[in-house]
Amino acid sequence: MALIVLTTSPRVAPGLLSHHAWRVLGASRVLTGSADHPCLPYLSEAGIVVEVVDPVPAELVGLARAGDVVWLAAQDGDESLMRAVGHAALAEQDPPLIELVPGSYDLPGARVLDLVAVMERLREECPWDAKQTHQTLVPYLLEEAYEVQETVEDGDYAALRDELGDVLLQVAFHARVADGFDIDDVAEGIVAKLVRRHPHVFGSVKVTGADEVNDNWETIKAAERAEKGAGSVLDGVPLGQPALTLVTKLQRRAERVEAPADLPADGVSPLGRELFDLVRRARAQGLDAEAELRAAARAYRDRVRHWETAD
C-alpha cells in the first residue's frame, strides 16, 4: 500500500503527463487539495475521478495504509504538506510507502517561462518597471554586459551564472517593453539566424574546421546585407562600442572589400592615427587590442593596489 505523490510542472502544458503518471492515475484513488488544478479538466476528460479534499496529513497516511492513493500535488509541489505527511508516516508503527511520481518534466529552457511571467507582473505592478523604456534601459544592458566580461576575465565562474541572469533579464525587459514584438519573436529571430548561418549543421554543407565555418558565416551575412540593400560593408557596425573594438571591427570589414590600408586620414590627430595603426599591428599578431589594453589596465590596477599597501 502506498501514497503516490504525483507532481506536475507549471511550465508544461497541463494534461501532457508521463505514461507512468497516467497508469497510476487510472489504477488508484486520486485526491487533490487544489480545486483549480489545471490538470483536472484533462483528467475528467479521460474518465479519471479526482476528489478535492482538505488535506489532513494523518488521514492521508491512514488512507494509504488501506490501499494505494494518488495525491495530485499542487503545482508548487505541496512541499509543506508533504513534509507533514512524512512526519505523520514516521509516527506510524507500520507506515505506508510514500512514492514520488513526476507527472511532467521541465524541458531545457523551461525556466525562461518563469522569467517571462515575473517580468509581466513587474511591468504591470511595479511603478519603476512600468515606466522604463528602451532608452532608459540601455545603460543597464551595457553595465550588465561589462560585468559578465569582468567575471570571465577574473575567472570567477561562480559569479558568471548570476551576471548572465542579469543580462537575460535585460533581454526579457526590452522584449516586454517593445511594441510590435515579444520574447517569442526575439527567440524566433535568433533561431532562424543560427539555422541559416550554420548550413553545415542544419543543411548539407561540409566544412573542415572552425575557419571554414567562420568564412561561411561571413559570406552568408554579406548576402543577407545585400538582400537588405545595405550600401556599405561597414553598415551595421555600432559606433557606440569601445574604440579599440570599433576600430578592429571596421578594419576587418574594410579588408573584406580590399579597401586600401593607407586611405587619407584627414582631421585625425597623429596620436589617433598611431592608435589606429596599433590596432592593425595587434591584429597582424593575432591579438585583440581591446583585450590587451584591458589586461594592461588590470595589471596596473593590481600594481597600484600593491604599492598602496606596501610598507
Image: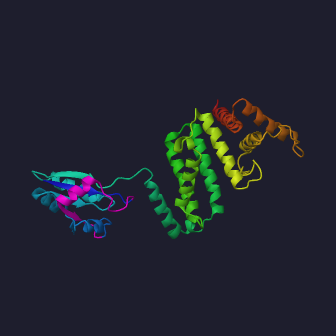
Q: Position of residue 75 (x, y in %)?
A: 33, 61
Residues 15 and 266: in front is: 15
Residues 299 and 306: in front is: 299
Quadrant assignment, res 78: bottom left
Q: Position of residue 244 (x, y in %)?
A: 73, 41
Quarter of the image containing the C terminus?
top right
The reply to whether the magenta stretch includes residue 173 is no
User: 266 left or right of 25?
Assistant: right
Q: How is the image coloured?
A: rainbow
Q: Residue at x 56, y 68 (%)?
A: 130
Quadrant assignment, res 301: top right
Q: Position of residue 92 (x, y in %)?
A: 12, 53
Q: Residue furthest front?
A: 204
User: 281 left or right of 75?
Assistant: right
Q: Residue at x 35, y 53 (%)?
A: 105
Residue range (magenta): 11-35
